[in-house]
Image (cartoon, grey):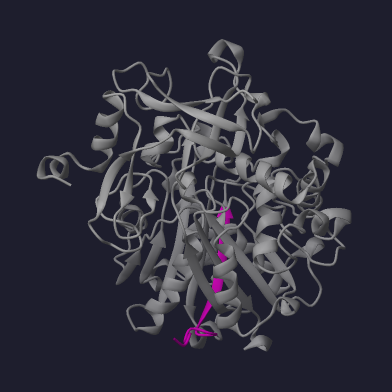
């Protein structure tokens, strides 16, 4: 990690990569394992050996729920846990599909997009959301 | 490592107040009313209290505010915040402080008006939950229930049995908020969806209220008004804070906390007469019974079916009606200790488990993040 990156901090680097259109996740040089969420030192080993690598964005739904919300407030929406191919799990949303259709085990693909919910609602900071991958 | 706290401290007073109310009282007003009742129950004066523990959703420095409100200058205080399980940690820490000679009698108390104001105060949302608008804790518990059904074939009807049993127990408690509202499995599975697969009757109540307990040394406890309820074993465990960090949505740190607490107390599951679990949602009861070893992982659904945890069942669980049907003023942990105390005193009235000598109280913090198990017993178990 360069001193510029050190100054920025772990989360801010992740967000900067997303603004530049790249889905990057840290990997530990010592363990070879990917680490998410972003950190300054490697969890478990405590080493300062994490660097960002671009990931495939391919994942599988581990857990999912359709949060019920009245239509006038935007209707029901999905929240889910996705196991990425690289071996880490992240919370996200699967978009552009009826939340009741989303099931454990379905394949999904990451997209970097501006969103109308959460911390970065309607801002210049895009986040990672997912869409279902159509069965071949 | 050797546990040295077995039988060293005892709960000598309990109290709660304002449950289910929609009053204009502040959280500290509820705390004070509960404290008044706990002191009266113990036969102690406020001036006997020289240690204090507590935590609310509304105070960064809860023990400072509590002690000031009550007009006491404690020799020791602690506001360890681990969610709804905090108060079980506080009990352990209070016994440690008493054993260490830092103080002699500790008040553990809190108050909440979450029912009236629907305000979770200073409760923080982890960064990556915030980004996706994950308003904890509901969606996390919903995903856990979904995973349990997916992995083990647990049915909607089995899970509903937890809510029905809790309501049956509540019918036997004069102070239970839902005392006069019986429900059936059909009612639960047809109640409005909240976050799939969780429905309204799978969720704990959101009430106001305050609760308090008073703890002192085993030696002092012998001379007080109530039959002492001794802390035999205690242990906490936490494995994550954010939902995405949970390794397996169907396995909680209760697996670790219960094993250590039972070992500390020198008991096994067959010694347990009554169990009080933090049932924020119906699935919690099932997962905690599994993690504590009362049944195998994945068999919790079948275990709770056919009235096994209901009044008259083989294993009495949440005999006050639990967070689902007794009360849930934002955090429920204290009520697991209060109901365990009532059962071990033999003062639980219509819901009394005959001959109860050993009780387990178990608190849960955040989304299966922090788990704390406490084993309590009568004098006969020392």
Seen as rendered, the residue at the extreme left is A3
Query: Which quadrant holds residue B160?
Result: top right
**Can the viewer see residue B329 in this picture?**
yes
Left or right of A97? Residue A43 is left
Give the residue displayed 73% in from the left and 80% down from the top.
B271
Identify which residue, B82 or B117, lies in the foreground: B82
Asked if residue B320 is positioned above or below residue B376 in the image, the reply reads above
**Image coords of residue B81 (percent x, y):** 40, 56
**Can the viewer see residue B104 in this picture?**
no
**Image coords of residue A78 (percent x, y):** 57, 27
- The N terminus of chain B lies in quadrant: bottom left
Give the residue displayed 57% in from the left and 46% down from the top.
B18
Asked if residue A44 is positioned above or below residue B241 in the image, the reply reads below
**Image coords of residue B347 (percent x, y):** 72, 69
State the count of labels: 0
What residue span does the magenta drawing correspond to?
A: B1-16
Q: Does the magenta stretch include residue B3?
A: yes
Q: Is residue B269 magenta?
A: no
Left or right of B13? Residue B65 is left
- The C terminus of chain B lies in quadrant: bottom right
Query: Which quadrant holds residue B15?
Result: bottom right
Identify which residue, B192 or B27, lies in the foreground: B192
Seen as rendered, the residue at the extreme top is A72
């Amino acid at each position: 990690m360069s001193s510029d990156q050190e100054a920025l901090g772990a989360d801010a680097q992740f967000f900067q990569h997303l603004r530049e259109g790249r889905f990057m996740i840290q990997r530990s040089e010592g363990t070879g394992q990917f680490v998410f969420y972003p950190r300054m030192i490697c969890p478990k080993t405590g080493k300062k050996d994490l660097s960002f690598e671009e990931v495939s964005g391919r994942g599988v739904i581990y857990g999912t729920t359709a949060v019920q919300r009245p239509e006038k407030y935007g209707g029901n929406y999905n929240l889910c846990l996705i196991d990425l191919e690289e071996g880490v799990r992240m919370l996200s949303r699967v978009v552009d599909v009826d939340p009741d259709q989303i099931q454990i085990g379905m394949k999904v693909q990451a997209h970097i997009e501006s969103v109308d919910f959460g911390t970065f609602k309607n801002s210049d900071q895009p986040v990672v959301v997912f869409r279902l991958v159509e069965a071949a | 490592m050797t546990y040295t706290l077995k039988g060293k401290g005892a709960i000598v007073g309990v109290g709660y107040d304002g449950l289910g109310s929609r009053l204009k009282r502040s959280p500290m007003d509820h705390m004070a009313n509960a404290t008044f009742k706990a002191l009266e129950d113990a036969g102690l004066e406020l001036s006997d209290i020289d240690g204090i523990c507590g935590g609310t959703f509304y105070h960064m420095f809860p023990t400072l505010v509590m002690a000031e409100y009550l007009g006491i200058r404690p020799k020791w205080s602690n506001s360890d915040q681990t969610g709804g399980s905090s108060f079980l940690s506080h009990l352990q820490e209070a016994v440690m402080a008493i054993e260490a000679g830092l103080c002699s009698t500790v008040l553990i108390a809190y108050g909440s008006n979450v029912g009236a104001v629907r305000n979770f105060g200073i409760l923080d949302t982890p960064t990556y939950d915030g980004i996706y608008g994950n308003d904890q804790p509901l969606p996390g518990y919903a995903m856990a229930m979904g995973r349990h059904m997916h992995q083990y074939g647990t049915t909607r009807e089995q899970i509903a049995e937890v809510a029905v049993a809790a309501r049956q127990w509540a019918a036997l408690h004069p102070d239970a908020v839902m005392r006069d509202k019986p429900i059936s499995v059909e009612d639960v599975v047809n109640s409005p969806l909240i976050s799939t697969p969780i429905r309204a009757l799978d969720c704990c109540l959101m009430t106001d209220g305050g609760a308090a307990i008073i703890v002192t040394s085993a030696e002092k406890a012998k001379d007080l008004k109530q039959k002492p309820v001794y802390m035999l074993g205690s242990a906490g465990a936490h494995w994550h804070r954010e939902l995405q960090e949970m390794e397996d949505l169907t396995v909680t740190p209760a697996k670790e906390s219960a094993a250590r607490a039972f070992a500390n107390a020198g008991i096994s599951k067959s010694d347990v007469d009554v169990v009080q679990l933090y049932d924020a949602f119906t699935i919690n009861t099932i997962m905690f019974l599994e993690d504590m070893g009362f049944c195998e992982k994945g068999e919790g659904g079948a275990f709770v079916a056919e009235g096994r945890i209901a009044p008259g069942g083989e294993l009495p669980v949440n005999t006050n009606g639990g967070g689902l049907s007794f009360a849930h003023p934002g955090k429920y942990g204290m009520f697991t200790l209060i109901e365990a105390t009532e059962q071990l005193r033999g003062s639980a009235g219509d819901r009394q488990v005959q001959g109860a000598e050993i009780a387990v109280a178990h608190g849960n913090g955040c989304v299966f993040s922090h788990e704390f198990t406490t084993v309590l017993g009568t004098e006969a178990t020392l």
